[in-house]
Image (tube, rainbow, N blue to C red):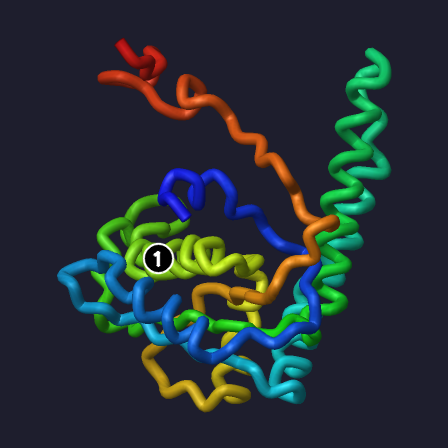
Amino acid sequence: MELYDAMRHTPSCRYFTDEPVPDAVIHRMLDHARFASSGGNRQGWRMVVVTDPDLKKAVADLHRKQWDPYFVHALEGVVGFQGDGSGSKMEHGTDRARQRLQRTDDFAQRLHEVPVLVLPYVELATLAVTDQHLDRTSIVGGGSLYTFVQNLLLAATNEGLGSSLTTLIAAEQPLMDELLGVPPGFALGALLAFGWPVPERQYTKLGRKPVEEIAFRNGWDRPFVAD
């Protein structure tokens, strides 16, 4: 698949078939993804590929431990949202939000059935967290992991696989480390799910904000537009 097509057609897949994914496909994806950039080219990432059914169930249980209360809270917010009284547009937005939540809950409840789960870790000693002393949440450290993660998602699309990324599992790192035998000094960054998508249950068109809303020229007050 051409790169720009892959970038525009890599949605979060919530519904997978039970067809196995060959190890050779996952290995090929990892082999290409490892050429992602990292700070100082230190390549501190490590991936745990989980295909064992019992182990997948244990991982899925930990994910649901975080997801279930989040889902209840988020659903209450959507159901409680009454709009501004302006009519069907607001109601349609609420319906779509509820549908997105339901799709994600379907994914969480059946996560153990997804053929391949990948747990991406990064070695803390390889990170230069240059924003750690600022008065806000640090984000820089993830830059040396998520380049690899994005490469994996694009690789999955190139292979015809569906993929999904969630970071809720990071809150369960102590138990995940014990479950997977991870040594000290590593941080869990996400949970990736890979499998063959159910075509009729996938998004066919992704919606995103236009460039002019997210990019600015020489400051924050002038949208970036092409000459």
What residue do we see at 23% from left, 17% from top? 218
Residue 63 located left or right of residue 42: right
What residue do we see at 66% from left, 88% from top? 54
x and y percentages locating residue 208 in the rendered image: 53, 30
Q: Secondary structure at mark 1?
A: helix
Of the pair 202 and 143, the residue shown nearer to us: 202
x and y percentages locating residue 73 in the rendered image: 76, 50
Q: Quick check: 159 above or below 131?
A: below
Residue 170 located left or right of residue 60: left
x and y percentages locating residue 200 in the rendered image: 74, 49
Q: Is residue 166 visible?
A: no
Q: Residue furthest left?
A: 40
x and y percentages locating residue 199 in the rendered image: 68, 52
Q: Quick check: 38 above or below 212?
A: below
Q: Residues within 10 Å of mark 1 (few under 14, many from 20)?
A: some
Amino acid under label 1? Answer: Gly
Q: Which residue is mark 1?
A: 142
Q: Is residue 102 visible?
A: yes
Which quadrant holds residue 135?
A: top left
Q: Quick check: 69 above or below 75?
A: below
What residue do we see at 44% from left, 45% from top? 6
Residue 82 located left or right of residue 130: right
Quadrant occupied by the C terminus: top left
Of the pair 158 and 163, the residue shown nearer to us: 158
Of the pair 169 and 114, the residue shown nearer to us: 114
Which quadrant holds residue 196?
A: bottom right
What residue do we see at 39% from left, 75% from top? 27
